[in-house]
Image: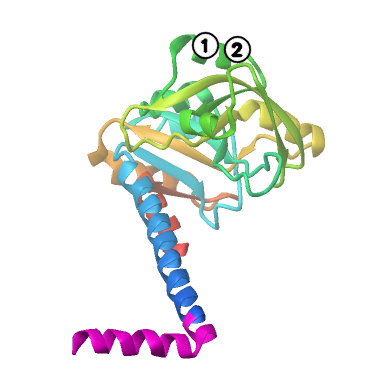
Amino acid sequence: SRMRLFELIFLNALRHKLRSFLTVVGVAFAVLAFGVIRTLITAWYAGADAAKPDRLVVRNKVSLVFSLPIAYLNKIQQVPGVVKAAPGNWFGGIYIEEKNFFPQFAVDMEPWFAMYKEYVVPPEQFKEALAERNACIVGRKLAQRFGWQLGQTVTLKGTIFPGDYPLVIRGIYSGREPSTDETQFFFHWAYLNERVEQLYPGSANRTGFFVVQITQPEQGAAVIQTIDSAFENSLAETLPETERAVQLGFVAVS
């Protein structure tokens, strides 16, 4: 009978308790690993889905590891179809300990937040952030995670850029849409540039990438070609891509 079958299965499982325990643990780990992987993939693709069709990213043609001269900014801004452009650097600092990971960027705040309208910062907070050299703007969920408040000083320990970076929270942004990432940390590119010059004289005035806003998404291919041609055969050739292509590139190599 069916009851007899279940009884035999139960009794057989108890015959080798260690084997049964290891089987259960193995299945649990497999389910957990699957859940983590699916969560990461969903997060990566969410970044690609949130990418705007009127934003491009210009980076070094060799790799994101290599920088570009900040002098490129003026030439990019003069390309027909370009509305705004801003430099950005992935910072990669440590907050207290390595497990406290969150995305950190040094950016030119005024044009950056004008392009990323999905990050909503109260006007008075944004004004204070622009006026203070070592100010930062953090996401609402990030502030909640660590219990941060406006006016609090957060010190990041640089890895790519050595040293301690004390940064004052002058703005907390919220997402315009429920899907907007509210876990990012932004501070002034100029502040990072000054610190780099102090640490390594003659090494400043370079940036990891430029974000470029264009008039119409349909102009993307033409703008990409123009930017690419402008820096062809230079010491630091560029690779302009749509923001979505960059995000999907991260998914592909992750």
Q: Which residues are magenta?
A: 1-20
x then y, percent, for residue 136: 59, 24
Residue 150 is inside the magenta segment: no
Q: Name the element at disc 1.
A: helix
Q: Tell me the quarter of the picture where residue 10 sits.
A: bottom left
Q: Which mark is residue 127?
A: 1
Task: Residue 131: give its label.
Answer: 2
Examine the rendering and report whether any part of residue 5 can be seen.
yes
Amino acid at pointer 2: Ala
For mark 1, does the 10 Å Cα neighbourhood hold few (<14), some (14 to 19), or many (20 or more) residues? Answer: some
**Above or below for 96 versus 16:** above
Q: Nearer the viewer, residue 103 or 204?
A: 103
In the image, 164 versus 57, the foreground residue is 164
**Mark 2 near mark 1, Cβ–Cβ under 8 Å?**
yes
Amino acid type, residue under disc 1 in the picture: Lys
Total numbered badges shown on the rendered structure: 2
Looking at the image, residue 88 sits to the left or right of residue 43; the answer is right
Place of residue 60 in the rendered image (x, y in percent of width and height, measured from the top left): 54, 50
SS for dot 2: helix
Q: Residue 4: x and y, percent?
A: 25, 89
Q: Is residue 225 visible?
A: no
Residues 122 and 108: in front is: 122
Location of residue 247 with respect to 35 vertically, above or below: above
Q: Could you tell me which quadrant the N terminus lies in?
A: bottom left
Residue 97 quadrant: top right
As displayed, is residue 74 above or below residue 203? Answer: above
| Secondary structure, magenta segment, majority class | helix
Residue at (65% x, 20% y) in the render? 152
